Image (cartoon, rainbow, N blue to C red):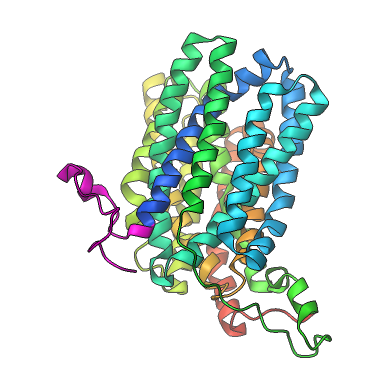
Amino acid sequence: MPGNAGDPDAGNGLPGAVRRRLHPDPMVRRLAGATLVNTVGNGLSLSVAVLFFTRVLGLSAAQLGLGMTAAGLCGVAASVPAGRAADRWGARPVLVVLVVAEAVGTAGYALVHSYPAFVALACGVAAVDRGSAAVRNALYAEVLPPERRVAGRAYLRVVTNIGICLGTAVGAVALQVDTRPVYLAAILADAASFAVVAVLFHRLPAHERPAPTAPQAGGGEPDGRRARRRNPALRDGPFLVVTVLNSVLCLQFAVLEVGVPLWIVQDTEAPRITVAGTLIVNTLLVVALQVRATRGTEDRATAARLCGRAGLLLAASCLVIALAHGLPAVVAALVVLGGVALQSLGEVLGQAGGWALSYDLAGERDHGAYQGVYNAGTAAAMMAGPALVTTAVIGFGPVGWAVLGGVLAAAGLAMGPAVRWAGRRGGSVLPV
């Protein structure tokens, strides 16, 4: 990629301290701008969503839970076809359409007056949201060279954490005011952020895409149409195994967002403010370490080892968090924060290794198909994780934490054999 010379986005006129924190690659800076706008809106929406749905739309907790579960299923299902659409029409135009649809759908919440309408709209918004996530990852493969993709994604993840924090801070003001007009304004502001993001993505320069995957021998139709209709990622055995193992590692997010807060409040003497402390510790460590954690991930064996270390760190974090049960308040709080610090270290290593493998095992074609399948695995973990953590972990106390730790360690360590299998097969597609 070109350097800063002659680049209008290079940060001229900005204070020196700000320029030093900007990424040297102009394309990553443009992606970071879109990411920041998007995540500020997301942070604002996430902070007020539950109260908006329950107090403004009048939904019960059970109705909200059922609706969001249905929406989660739609999100999982949408990732794969969205990725294939990116391969067919290009990631940038498909992403713009999906983000515009998400802007319209999010604004539509202000017009909802019945439960069926809410469920239908939530399913549509979740579908375009998870679909756009898959296509966005494919876009990174289109616009960033292979050796810079993982580091670029790490930088964008740092921006994501900063944006969500900023949005949440604004959302805290809305929660304090606690009126219907303010909640509506927050939802509409999130919708507006999607519209801005769509414009920013539309303004990205077009990039030449690789030719479609060549038809496999014996595939039938000589023009390759039948081969192009099939999803190569769904026939790539090693890649599917890596996807499943990564989805298991992604259960860590449900642990942090659901498991740890419930554990603190229900099963330890730690003060409730510790919940906020865990989020602060996680955010600070991710911001500080995520880019650094990507070093060396150009080699798939190194990426697999990072996933193995991530699994061990996540297992250790589960065991440490479990030890907080029965301890005095201050000691319990320190133990939980220590466990979350281990989880955060595992998170940055697992994300770096997982990103690298998702791109490396796909090669340089069909990025939409591969990122769609990979994102579907992540979405499935996000959907099933909260219920799994609350029932199988919190419900069984320290034993549940120990079992979860064992599962996470096994998933991380299994990445090595899965990647070696991919190497023996050359990352090839399994025969039909």
Tell me the quadrant of the picture where the C terminus can be found.
Answer: bottom right
Judging depth in this view, the residue of 330 and 86 nearest the camera is 86
Q: Is residue 209 above or below residue 311?
A: below
Res. 109 image quadrant = top right
Residue 17's spot in the image, x, y percent? 18, 43
Residue 91's spot in the image, x, y percent? 58, 61
Start-end of magenta stretch? 1-27
**Residue 342 can be seen, yes or no:** no
At a point 35% along the width and 44% down the height, the residue shown is 287
**Residue 44 can be seen, yes or no:** yes
Residue 155's spot in the image, x, y percent? 37, 52
At a point 47% along the width and 62% down the height, the residue shown is 353
Q: Is residue 347 above or below residue 432?
A: above
At a point 54% along the width and 45% down the height, the residue shown is 252
**Relative horizontal placement of residue 225, taking residue 411 as reference (left or right):** right
Judging depth in this view, the residue of 76 and 188 nearest the camera is 188
Tell me the quadrant of the picture where the N terminus can be found.
Answer: bottom left
Q: Is residue 417 above or below residue 339?
A: below
Question: What predominant SS class does the magenta segment belong to?
Answer: loop
**Relative horizontal placement of residue 115, taking residue 57 as reference (left or right):** right
Count the marks: how many?
0
**Relative horizontal placement of residue 179, taking residue 115 as reference (left or right):** left
Judging depth in this view, the residue of 130 and 250 nearest the camera is 130
